[in-house]
Image (tube, rainbow, N blue to C red):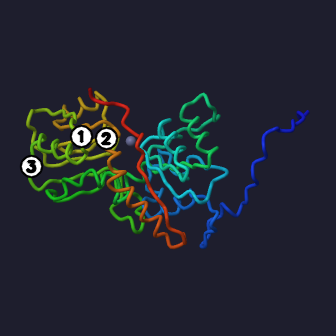
Amino acid sequence: MPRQVQQSSYPTAPPIDPGMFRVTGLIPAQVAPIHYIKRVWERIAPLQLADKSWDNVGVMIEAPYPVSNRKRVLLTIDLTAAVCDEALSMPDCGVIVSYHPPIFRALKSMTLSDPIQTSLLRLASKGISVFSPHTSLDATPNGINTWLVEPFIPIASSSTPLVPSDPPISGFEGAGSGKLVILKQRLCILDIAKMVKDHLGLQYVQIACPEPELTIGSIAVCAGSGGSMFKDVKADLLFTGEMSHHEVLAAVARHQGVILCNHTNTERPYLRAVLQPWLEKELNNDPDNGESGWSVSVSQSDADPLRVV
Ligand SMILES: [Zn+2]
């Protein structure tokens, strides 16, 4: 027997106009900001570029009562509670682009007992949606891995994806996971470590090598955690954010050098260097948007949880 439904004492939520979620050639002014992000993202890093065999990308949570004139997008690597507070303190923030997906596995509930779910529920209740590009942003031709190999390009004879996108997407030629850079001349691993530190703005990186001044002719690169990507890669040097102890030992046993920077140190600088101006330009130049005034900010609270002391 169905239970009698109690009359709620809470104020009634405004009715949802289904038209506000419809994306057509001409976008009505009340369309939720997340729909602009979804469309513009197809010009930056189509979600088909993501490795869907394990990754979760796209809209993570869609605020049911979005505020259409919120034209600020907040970029972050991780959706921590601090980043959530920062977004909620911005009256014009309508969308968070969180590079790492805050929802990764199937959920059976959304409750306040989980810190990440708490952030998502708080954001949704205040009209802020969350979008995660993750490996689509690694793989796109102007993506994170392309930015990571930038200092090597003037001294390289080639730079190609470790795993090219399959099938290729028109307009995104050269997309794929990771990078393999072949240098014109061999360089000492210590010189390469210096280039990496300068590019990423780091005081320290970790290196492992089978001999103290290993010379390098080829570099495999992967943002974040590259251990599994590098499994069968034949390169003199593996450059990534983190690898496990045993992955490092195996690489050194294969006579490979390793440079590790901490996971998000290989990802976060890209937000300010490339994505912030790129996304802001695309949002303000969207031919179907009809409105400008979009702002894209990089989170001040987002940081690698580990620090060297
Ligand atoms: Zn990562």
Closer to the camera in the image, 53 or 205: 205
Side of 211 where 4 appears, left or right = right
* Residue 186 image label: 3
The amino acid type found where label 2 is placed reads Asn
| Residues tagged 1 and 3 counted as in contact (Cβ below 8 A) | no
Quadrant for residue 245, please give it: top left
Label whose residue precedes the other's in the sequence (2 or 3) = 3
* Residue 132 image label: none
| Residues tagged 2 and 1 counted as in contact (Cβ below 8 A) | yes
Q: Secondary structure at mark 3?
A: strand
**CA gap, disc 1 and disc 3:** 24 Å
* Residue 202 image label: 1
The amino acid type found where label 3 is placed reads Arg
**CA gap, disc 2 and disc 3:** 26 Å
Image quadrant, ligand 1: top left
Label whose residue precedes the other's in the sequence (1 or 3) = 3
* Residue 265 image label: 2
Q: Residues within 10 Å of mark 2 (few under 14, many from 20)?
A: many
